[in-house]
């Protein structure tokens, strides 16, 4: 729940259900959590799974200290970071990721993985993510593959050819 709350702080989305506490519900549509941030962070490939319990303790310790310093009473039914209001979560996350913060190297990668989940759908194959209506890819207008499952781009993305094809490039696009 704490990691989901952090991911939602980085890229907010709407609540999954009315009692959802991890997602603050400050934005319409799906955010980092519904884009698969937790799946990506807990995947073997991500390399974060073993570190997550330590990060959860750290986030909650920082959240409790944040609240204590400001005289904010936190709801004890949820972890301290989850209990913070969205504005306080955002301020705390910004403080933790600020240049010069002694733990910046822990929090920035956590945020980066949250962004990665939203803007790439990295927890699953892109075709599957698009078919499921992945929030980030959909919001960005990521083009679906052709009927054969491959992406082809008949127009140049900059609306002009940026460089000529090398004369020894094969018909399949292989370099010489």
Image (spheres, grey):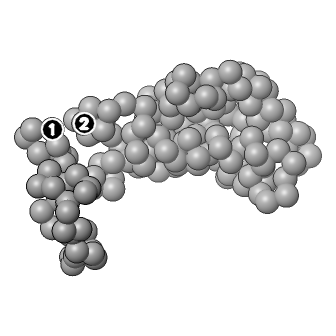
- Quick check: 115 above or below 55? below
SS state under label 2: helix
**Which residue is painted at 72% across and 35% down in the image?**
81
Circle 2 Cα neighbour tier, 10 Å, few/some/many (<14 / 14–19 / ≥20): some
Viewer-nearest residue: 176 or 68: 176
**Which residue is painted at 68% across and 26% down in the image?**
52
> Where is residue 146 shown, x and y percent of the image?
11, 45
**Which residue is painted at 21% across and 78% down in the image?**
160
Q: Which residue is mark 1?
A: 149
Q: Quadrant of the C terminus?
A: bottom left
Circle 1 Cα neighbour tier, 10 Å, few/some/many (<14 / 14–19 / ≥20): few
In the picture, residue 44 is in which quadrant? top right
> Where is residue 43 shown, x and y percent of the image?
52, 24
Viewer-nearest residue: 153 or 113: 153
Q: Which residue is mark 2?
A: 127
SS state under label 1: loop
Q: Are marks 2 and 1 in contact (CB under 8 Å)?
A: yes
Exactly how many numbered labels are in the figure? 2
Which comes before the other along the chain, label 2 or label 1?
A: 2
> Where is residue 169 shown, x and y percent of the image?
20, 60
**Which residue is painted at 7% across and 40% down in the image?**
147
- Quick check: 115 above or below 23? below
Viewer-nearest residue: 66 or 145: 145
In the picture, residue 134 is in which quadrant? top left
Is 72 placed left or right of 151 in the picture? Answer: right
> Where is residue 113 shown, x and y percent of the image?
56, 41
């Amino acid at each position: 729940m704490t990691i989901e709350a952090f991911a939602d702080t980085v890229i907010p989305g709407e609540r999954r259900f009315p009692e959802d506490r991890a997602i603050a519900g400050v934005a319409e549509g799906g955010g980092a959590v519904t884009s698969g941030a937790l799946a990506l962070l807990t995947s073997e490939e991500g390399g974060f799974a073993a570190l997550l319990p330590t990060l959860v303790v750290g986030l909650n310790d920082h959240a409790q200290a944040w609240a204590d310093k400001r005289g904010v009473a936190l709801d004890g039914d949820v972890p301290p970071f989850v209990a913070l209001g969205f504005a306080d979560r955002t301020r705390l996350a910004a403080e933790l990721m600020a240049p010069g913060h002694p733990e910046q190297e822990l929090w920035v990668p956590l945020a980066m993985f949250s962004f990665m989940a939203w803007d790439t759908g990295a927890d699953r194959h892109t075709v599957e993510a698009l078919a499921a209506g992945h929030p980030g890819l959909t919001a960005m207008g990521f083009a679906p593959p052709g009927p054969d499952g491959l992406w082809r781009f008949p127009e140049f993305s900059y609306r002009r050819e940026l460089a000529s094809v090398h004369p020894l490039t094969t018909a399949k696009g292989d370099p010489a």
